[in-house]
Image (cartoon, helix red, strand yellow):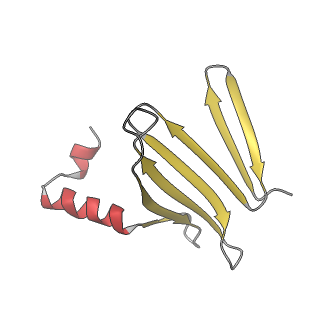
Amino acid sequence: MANFRGVIQGSRGSASRLGHSRLEGRVAGWDIGVGLCAYRDDNGNDRIGIHVDEGNGYNAGRSFSLGTVVPSDDGPVWIPSSAARAIVRSLDHAGVTEEDLNR
């Protein structure tokens, strides 16, 4: 039995895939992309890593981790990477509010 299931919807319908120990996916435009990697850690716990990249365009190449989503008794929890924590700190320093982010 598969541990992971991925579903994607496009203009020609949906497709799904199963992964036993790992499942990876990516959605990207020309300038931005997001990747997910679902896997089991050494203790058998589910994890989903989140990565951001520069998309499929000419200058594509750089990527960084936003962190990992892990299960907890209270539901899924995002553990931000050091890069994501730096972004949050820079937004705080610039005075960006949650309201600004939700526009």
Q: Point out the residue furthest to the bottom here.
A: 43
Image x and y of residue 10, in percent:
61, 26
- Seen as rendered, the residue at the extreme left is 94
Between 22 and 89, the residue placed more toward the observer is 22
Residue at the spot 65% in from the left edge and 73% down from the top edge: 41
Position of 53 relative to 41 (above/below) = above
Q: Is 54 situated above or below 83?
A: above
Quadrant of the image containing the C terminus? top left
Q: Give residue 75's position: percent from left, percent from top.
A: 56, 65
Q: Relative to 83, is 2 on the left or the right?
A: right
Left or right: residue 98 compared with residue 66: left
Q: Nearer the viewer, residue 82 or 47?
A: 82
**Among the 4 quarters of the image, the one containing residue 29:** top left
Residue extending furthest top? 12
In the image, what residue occupies the spot 27% across and 64% down? 86
Decide which of 28, 44 is in the foreground and name it.
Answer: 28
Q: Residue at x 72, y 74 (%)?
A: 44
**Which residue is pictured at 20% across the width and 60% down the height?**
90
- Vertically, is 15 above or below 53? above
In percent of width and height, residue 11 lies at 61, 20
Query: Which residue is at the far right?
Result: 1
**Quarter placement of the N terminus:** bottom right
What is the count of numbered marks?
0
